[in-house]
Amino acid sequence: MDQTHLEEWSTTECIYNERINKIHNRTLLYLKGALLQEIEGNTDTEEKIFKLNFLSWLEYKLNNFSAAKTRTDEVLRLTNSTNLTALIGKVKILYKLKGNDNLEATKKTLKELLSERLAEDAKIDSRAQLAYCYCRLGGAAFLKRSISIFEDLLKRQPINDYWNLSLGIAHYTAWTTSPSRRLKGHLNEAAKLLTGVINTSNNSLFVRLAYRRMLSIKRYSDKYNTMMLAKKVIFQLPLRKLVDEILKIGVDDAKTLSMLAETLRANCEVDRAIQLLQKSLKLKEMSKTYHFLGKCYEEKGYNNFEKPKESYEKSIQLSETNFTAICDYDKFLMLRNLEEECLTQFRKMTDTVSCAVTWQTIAANFTILEMKSAKLVLLLNNVGDRPGFLMFS
């Protein structure tokens, strides 16, 4: 890369300029798979741009440079070539592709953007994109960076709905990924920010996304009687009433219906959960929805066990990285003494997993089965030999 390029834009805060190394390819592939499902049917342009930029960066890190270019081109079409993250990404991608005639034209567009009066706005947007990427990468260090950037941005634009939502999600993720769930500060901040989005935003998608997390926090609050959340109106509603409120804005949204169904299942309302899941699948087939449906059918106790089996298998077919579905399916098989089928699923999973937190989840999920299968114990004992941490510098 020439020196001129380095001097002009390599110091801009942008995901492509960050030194994020040694993330295992399996983790990148897992994130890529999740984004591909999310982008399909995404109607909010701002959120779609963030996801497309992150997807492009993932392809770049996976050395899929042509695919990365396709994604950046899509962002540039949506933004009339004014998205700084996409432009920096495209320059770096074109250097990798070598000999592409568009390189000089892209560098010129990038230089012009940085010299215009809107350059500061473009840099702010690039920072927001960076914070979003950190949040999606997960892990304590990345989430800390994400929260720090979003907090700084909101000092300048405190009423930006998407940034408030994103900061709330970052705090929520930091809370949910804590092994002991003792990070109550993150819980309180998430509840405050997400409630604010629900009460003030005119964007129905943002409200639905906020409600999805708040429903989980509500269940936690009800279970553990969390006093610091008690004053918020949303936590004073009975769970059934809250579900009804969310249905008013999410009755035609597959993800919202799926999330509500899982909440109802956990609240022992399995029949109503099945109805919502079936409606969700008519709108869009998703791995998580089939997973939740399998759990519902299993809890209903169908004698021939075909319905839960078919639902679990469909879930895994749609997403081979839905590890919780694989774990639940394996437990379902083992409890019915189908050891070899269980071990086949587990071996597939061990060839895919890279994240240490996921390994902890797998080990916890299979603890109840260890005494039933000596072969499974042997496989679990080999978990520590697998690569397992997201490294960065």
Image: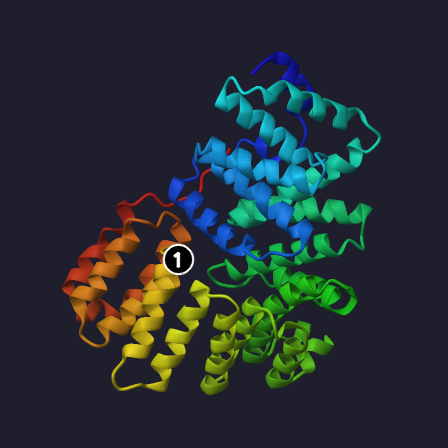
Query: Residue drawn at (56%, 60%), measured in percent from left and top?
Result: 175
Q: Residues within 10 Å of mark 1 (few under 14, many from 20)?
A: some
Q: Is residue 36 left or right of residue 346?
A: right
Q: Is residue 144 visible?
A: no
Query: Residue drawn at (78%, 31%), measured in percent from left and top?
Result: 119
Q: Nearer the viewer, residue 68 or 212?
A: 68
Q: How many marks?
A: 1
Estimate the x, y position of residue 328 in percent, counting from the top left.
Answer: 34, 69
Is 286 placed above or below 306 here? above
Q: Amino acid at mark 1?
A: Ser
Disc 1, SS: loop
Estimate the x, y position of residue 220 in percent, counting from the top left.
Answer: 56, 74
Estimate the x, y position of residue 280 in percent, counting from the top left.
Answer: 51, 72
Query: Residue drawn at (58%, 19%), measured in percent from left and top?
Result: 101
Instruction: Please give the residue where the numbered disc 1 appears in the rendered image.
Output: 319
User: What color scheme is it?
Assistant: rainbow
Q: Residue furthest top?
A: 3
Query: Residue drawn at (33%, 49%), measured in percent from left and top?
Result: 352
Q: Is residue 174 left or right of residue 288?
A: right
In which quadrant of the rendered image does the N terminus lie? Answer: top right
Q: Nearer the viewer, residue 69 or 236?
A: 69
